[in-house]
Amino acid sequence: MRKILVLLIASVTLISCQQKTAYVNNQEIMEGFDKLKEAEEKFVQEEEAMKAKMDAMVAQSGYQDLVQEYQSKQGKMSKSEEEDLYNKIMQIQQSLGQQQQMNNQQFQQQKNSEMDSLVNTVKDFVKTYGKDNGYTFIYGSNESGNILYGKDELDITEDVVKALNAKYPVESEDEATDETANEASAEEAETETPE
């Protein structure tokens, strides 16, 4: 019985020594993921475009002109004219505010959805990376300190970021332009009729 117990303890010790573990810095992975950087740049551009569109809507509505008219004629108009102009300004302001709120909500939903998708891509990639490289565990460290200490040689963050960016490369503007040109050429070839 004693020999079995010693053999069991030795087996458990041997098995636990054979487990391959590592850790990654979650923040560094996200910061190093080129697709995430690309998405953030796209969000900045979309937000600027949305602001420009809203500014154009404000200009087109005549809101600023009506406010200036109201301010310059205030006290010089009849009470009913003043009320009508004020109500018109408030109606435009409310409509613009609702449009801006709707745009912001749609933008935020799109951004959250895309960010969630990228986070899931990273999680799935790390899981596959771990399986493919024989890891039993890959821990994630973050600012909350769930890994307080780990040997530097167990930190595979850099390797994971390189592999992640290799699997999900960002298309350069030249590649995107070439791809669009190739698609256009292919469409032209399909529409040409032989003579």
Image (cartoon, helix red, strand yellow):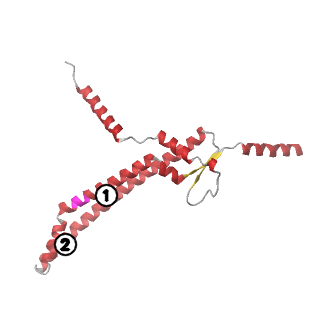
**Residue 153 image position (x, y, % from top left):** 63, 47
Q: Which residue type carries mark 1?
A: Asn
Which residue: 26% across, 26% down? 189
Residue occupying the far top of the picture: 195
Q: Which circle marks residue 33 in the picture?
A: none
Can residue 86 be seen here? yes
**Residue 35 image position (x, y, % from top left):** 43, 46
For disc 2, the neighbor class at 10 Å (few under 14, some 14 to 19, many from 20) is few
Q: Secondary structure at mark 2?
A: helix
Q: Nearer the viewer, residue 154 or 117?
A: 154
Q: What residue is pinned by disc 2?
A: 87
Q: Which circle marks residue 103 in the picture?
A: 1
**Residue 109 image position (x, y, % from top left):** 39, 55
Q: Which residue type carries mark 2?
A: Asn
Residue 144 lies within the magenta run: no
Frontmost of labels 1 and 2 is 1
Magenta stretch: give its range.
Answer: 53-57
